[in-house]
Amino acid sequence: MEVINTIGRRKTSVARIYMQPGKGDIKVNNKDMQEYFPVDIMQIIVKQPLVTVDADGKYDIKVNVDGGGVKGQAEAIRLAIARALCEVDAEFRPPLKKEGFLTRDSRMVERKKYGRRKARRRFQFSKR
């Protein structure tokens, strides 16, 4: 029984996953996925790659995720799972690539600059 280890990142979230053949239970930070992501949409995001290749319920996945917010973490896990599925079977690559699950979304929060209120927002200008 081979354990596949991959990493996924999104914004400031980093997800490390350990995937092996099993009956489909997903643990996130030692909690059940339904407990860690109580919102249905986040659970759907995590399972998207598995559903795309009809592998839902075939693999046990253990996830360590840290940093960022709930959505960033869910999308980091999605990328890690998609990468792991490609390692399992090269046949899975085209459908996952088509859906865009193998692309690292490199968008990050722009840093705040000095002399500005935010990254680009200037302080209010007063003529008088």
Image (cartoon, grey):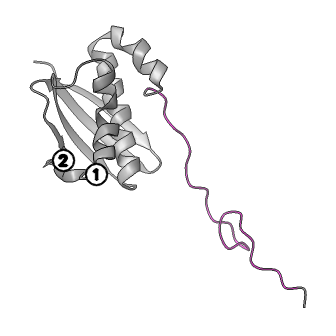
Q: Which residues make up the magenta segment?
A: 102-126
The vertical placement of 24 against 110, above or below, is: above
* Residue 121 locus on image (x, y percent): 71, 68
Identified at 21% across, 25% down, the residue is 56
Mark 1 crowdedness (10 Å alpha carbons): few <14, some 14-19, many ≥20 = few
Instruction: Name the residue furthest front.
Output: 40
Identified at 54% across, 40% down, the residue is 106
Q: Secondary structure at mark 2?
A: helix
* Residue 76 locus on image (x, y percent): 38, 40
Q: Which disc number belongs to residue 95?
A: none
Report the front residue among 85 and 66.
85
Q: Which SS type dominates the magenta stretch?
A: loop
* Residue 104 locus on image (x, y percent): 48, 34
Query: The N terminus lies in which quarter of the figure?
Result: top left
Q: Are marks 1 and 2 in contact (CB under 8 Å)?
A: no
Residue underneath mark 2: 34
Q: Secondary structure at mark 1?
A: loop
Identified at 55% across, 49% down, the residue is 108
Residue underneath mark 1: 39
Report the front residue among 95 and 77.
95
**Mark 1 vs mark 2, CA separation in Å:** 8 Å
Instruction: Name the residue furthest top.
Output: 91
The quadrant where residue 10 appears: top left
Can residue 63 be seen in the rendering of this structure?
yes
Dot 1 or dot 2, earlier in sequence: 2
Q: What amino acid is found at the position of numbered circle 2 in the picture?
A: Gln
In the rendered structure, does residue 104 fall within the stretch colored magenta?
yes
